[in-house]
Image (tube, rainbow, N blue to C red):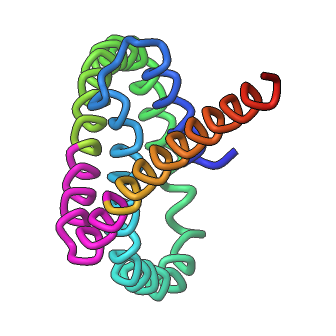
Amino acid sequence: MTVPTDVKKVGDALVASGKATLAEARKPLLAWVGVNRAALTRTRELPEVAKQLQDRIAGLPGRVKTLPVVIPASADVVTAQAKQIAGRAQEAQKLAESVATGVAGRIVETYTGLVGRGEEVVTTAKRQPAAEQATAQAKTAKSRGKAASTAARKAAAAAAEAATATADKTTR
């Protein structure tokens, strides 16, 4: 199932349950639009990131040559650091718990930001001349559809009335 389908299902479920207003039902879709805009922004940064990685890779051959000397000297240092890390494990656990609490707030904040970003994209798109023209055409089509429905209903009623009158005349 695609993301837009999932978003639509969530929105439909919220509206169907009566627990959400139209604005609440739009939030998943707007968040999806915001995520796409954020992904596009990040994608545009990729050439610079690739350049930085190429620069780092270029320096690796020189560093690899020094490893046979550096590794044995570093073994004692690593052992001492491992002991320090073991002592800090409990501190890290406490820190992780406090960070998890903060992350929950940031998730809500990020989601709200994505909704805002999506709202901005949709609002901008609505203001485009093509969107305004499409909206006007849709309103016209809706109006014509209602008029055609009314005309068809009246014609059907008139035909039924005429058929009843004819039937009454033939049975007399």
**Residue shown at 33%/69% (left/top)?**
134
31 horizontally vs 105: left or right: right
Quadrant holding the N terminus: top right
SS assignment for the magenta stretch, majority? helix
**Residue shown at 35%/13% (left/top)?**
97
Q: Give the x, y percent position of residue 155.
A: 55, 46
Nearer to me, 22 or 141: 141
Residue at the far front: name it: 172
Nearer to me, 87 or 32: 32
**Residue shown at 34%/68% (left/top)?**
137
Q: Is residue 92 above or below residue 163?
A: above
Quadrant hosting residue 45: bottom left
Q: Give the x, y percent position of residue 46.
A: 40, 76
82 horizontally vs 161: left or right: left
Nearer to me, 55 or 32: 32
Quadrant hosting residue 100: top left
Q: Is residue 14 above or below residue 144?
A: above
Nearer to me, 72 or 156: 156
Q: Give the x, y percent position of residue 115.
A: 27, 42
The verdict on residue 131 being magenta is yes
Give, as a single range, the part of the protein colored magenta: 116-139
Quadrant hosting residue 26: top left
Quadrant holding the C terminus: top right
The verdict on residue 37 being magenta is no
Q: Give the x, y percent position of residue 145.
A: 45, 54
Q: Is residue 89 above or below residue 125?
A: above
**Residue shown at 80%/31% (left/top)?**
170
Q: Total marks drawn?
A: 0
Residue at the far right: name it: 171
